Image (tube, grey):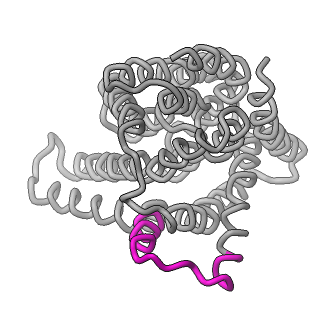
Amino acid sequence: MNGPVVSSLLPVVFLIAAGYLAGRLRWIQGGAVKDLSNLVFLLLAPPLLFRSMSTVRLEQLSLKPVAAYFVAAGLIFAATLAWRGFNRTGVVLALANTYSNTVMIGIALVGLAYGPEGMVVLLTLISLHSLVLLTSATVFLELAVAHEDAQRREPGGEGRRAMARAVARALRNAIIHPVQAPILLGLLFAQTGLAIPEALDKPIALLGQAFSPVALVLVGITLALTPVGLHWRNALTQALVKNLVHPALVAVLGWVFGLRGLPLTVMVVAAALPIGANVFLFAQRYRTSEALITASVVVSTVMALATLSAVMAVAGRL
């Protein structure tokens, strides 16, 4: 098995296992999960996202490699919505099929396997990954919630003014969302050319560094408190789509776009990364498919020990 893959994935598996143990031993009770989710989503995620975007200059980005990634993600996202329907569950599952763990696993893996040149390609993707996928998911989720609310108030889909107000509210909520707002603010800040003052940057960095481990431990806690075994078949389907279908589609589109060598290899490997923990947080926040997403994150991460090794072996020949 590929050494860099194992060394990058084992910490993730360990953190999920630690959370699982804490849940099984009832160190964390079920009533605290919502508060922990708010801690991760509202306090730890914004500093990480703002700081990640605060140094991204638009003119420095090479967008051709990431275009293959996002076009493939868009096709899978649309196909999932067509299959599952336009509702909160469909949107969350579509996000799970397309959102990679690019930070917690991807940075360590690509740095070890492909060196500084590979890291440049990956960081270009990371600078846009959350902005594109999480913003899109938030818009679709808010629109789905608005549609559900309008349907409850207006049987049969009547009331165009009510729906228009709901759509406007959804778009507003997407902009001021605790994930999207720091991404957009960080990107705007980066264009000023200024640097975050050290007195502010250090606490922001410390909060951001706490995001990944706490989020993964939270996945493990929820795993222990949720009957995930009932969802293993669907979780396996989600994991197969994310770990194998997504990178295969990126590889095909990359060839169509004329990509070759390291840029294409890194994009294919990034697409083969397991489902990111942010998807679990979205499932919790919008109260849909929490058990299935929890199972999918775990199955996808464990499966990646084998699938990533295979994808990296094939991608190295592209």
213 or 163: nearer the viewer: 213
Point 59% across, 68% down: residue = 47
Residue 196 located within the stretch drawn in magenta: yes
Principal secondary structure, stretch drawn in magenta: helix
Point 60% across, 16% down: residue = 233
Which percent across, then down, holds residue 160? Answer: 9, 53
Which percent across, then down, holds residue 180? Answer: 43, 61
Q: In this image, 119 relative to 94: left or right? A: right
Identify whether 4 is placed above or below 41: above
Point 53% across, 26% down: residue = 265
Residue 300 located within the stretch drawn in magenta: no
295 or 228: nearer the viewer: 295
Which percent across, then down, holds residue 105? Answer: 68, 40
Point 50% across, 21% down: residue = 241
71 or 261: nearer the viewer: 261
Q: What segment carries the magenta color?
A: 182-203
